[in-house]
Amino acid sequence: MSDTLMISVSGMRGHVGTDLTPELVARHAAALGAWVRTSSAGQTAAARRERPRPAVVLGRDSRTSGPMFARAAAAGFMSVGVDVIDVGVVPTPTVQMAVEHHHAGAGLILTASHNPIEWNALKFVGPDGIFLDDEAGSRVRALAEAGPPRMGWDGLGTLSEDREAVARHLDAVLALPVIDVAAIRARRFHVALDCVRGAGASAIPPLLERLGCRMSAINLEPDGRFPRAPEPVPENLGDLGALVLESGAAVGLAVDPDVDRLALVDERGHPIGEDYTLAFAVRAVLDGRGSAAEHPTVVVNLSTSLVVEDAARAAGARLVRAPVGEANVARAIRDEGAVVGGEGNGGVILPALHIGRDAPLGVALILHLLAKSGVSVSDLVASAPRYTIVKAKGPRGPELRPLYDRLRTRFPDAGTDERDGLRLSWRDRWLHVRPSGTEPIVRLIAEAPTAGEAEALVAAARELLH
């Protein structure tokens, strides 16, 4: 396996042309289709009423390799007797919701999310709209390695298109009781938007239009030729900040290429960090519940900022942390009966809509909070406790256990969590060291009340790493 081919339970990602080829994509799509045929996933009563064969939903982001891989994937699915419902270039959460809408046995999303332009990936979705778990992912990989059984001329699947998936997605967002659409429309927000030439243009502009917003936008062309590093982190949002100032927008919105993450820029043109997206979304959801439930639950991952924890606890909610990764957080949300959750990278999950990270949902919740509170984005930030989060990367060796042991020895007073790498925690700060699931690196993440304190934690980890 190459250094850049990353394989996880819910799919794989790598460099186009070296790690990912049409042959590999076709084989793994066929394996996912064969898994659907041999599991109960594709044989539900609702599915049988709609079609004679099990079906899968296929969607992608705007990367230049997408059309090639979509054709290869469709061929792989059809070769094992599975029907393909192609939803085109759409947000990742749109595909997840389409799987449930069509009672499909699975979904395949061709997207490398925030990875640079030379990457693409396959993401496998189960019939519940959640990315595959360990057991299902292992079965799909085994089928790919063994060679999935193919059909003859009379057993092949068919290909159809669904071009209403985004509209259904937006309809569902705007129908949520927690979103006060009238209040948002009354404010006629001026919004600046950066879609990084990804799939966001298919969903965010029409959503803003339906919410009565005026829009100034850059990078709406969905051609996959990213004009900047595609991850919506502060250092990549300079152009959006300039657009906010130039246009006088009340808020800047940035999404990643597959539109499951949302980052904000305040009215002064300052990127505020992705964790505030989830913190504000949690506030919007919990404030809107009133006394409907005592001690609701919020689920976040181990690397999510304390600003989210503070927002949850201020509303009387119980906070649960899960290992990093949308599938882990989604299953914890389901198992804990949480009302809202997500990841500090700007991924908001509202189970009342679906259990997946959803940037269009995040946009609606943020505008709802701004409309109901009557204050600016910078005021919302100023009203929250302040922390500084520092993120770094390091080389990934063959074994991280010695590093974890050295860190525990260095910080014997810290609370420890080893469900996903090693997380050391104190009352007002934490350090998380974990192998990346999307790049061949080790991630070093720390948060503390000041930048110096957070940087000192990262420096200690980096020193022990070497």
Image: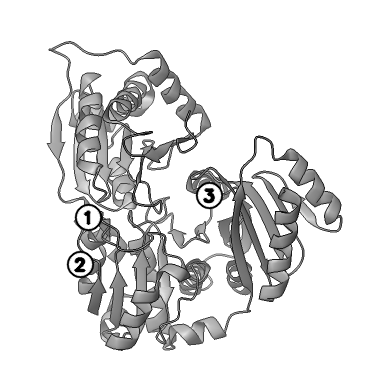
Q: Front-most of 27 and 349?
A: 27
Cα–Cα span, label 2 and label 3: 29 Å
Local crowd size for mark 3, using a 10 Å CA cut-off: few (<14), some (14–19), many (≥20) = many
Q: Where's residue 328, x and y in %?
A: 54, 45
Residues 251 and 404: in front is 404
In the rendered structure, which disc, 3 or 1, sits on the residue that comes first in sequence? 1
The residue where tag 3 is placed is 329
What residue appears at the point 45 percent right and 60 percent down from the top-left corner? Answer: 348
Q: Check contact, mark 1 vs mark 2: CB within 8 A.
A: yes
- Going by the image, does 165 lie left or right of 261? left
- Label 2 CA crowd tier, 10 Å (few <14, some 14–19, many 20+): some
Left or right of residue 5, residue 427 in this image: right
Image location (x, y in percent) of residue 196 = 30, 63
Q: Earlier in the sequence, mark 1 or mark 2?
A: 1
167 relative to 180 in the view: left or right? left
Above or below residue 167? Residue 24 is above
Position in image of residue 326 (x %, y %): 48, 48
Mark 2 or mark 3: which comes first in sequence? 2
Marks 3/1: CA distance? 24 Å
Q: Which residue is mark 2?
A: 206
Helix, strand or loop under label 3: helix
> Which residue was labeled with disc 1?
166
Q: Given the image, on which type of amino acid does mark 2 rest?
A: Pro
Check the image and report above or below for 22 versus 380: above
Q: Residue at x 42, y 87 (%)?
A: 268
Quarter of the figure with residue 169: bottom left
SS type, badge 2 = helix
The kind of residue tagged 1 is Val
Q: Which circle marks residue 438 in the picture?
A: none
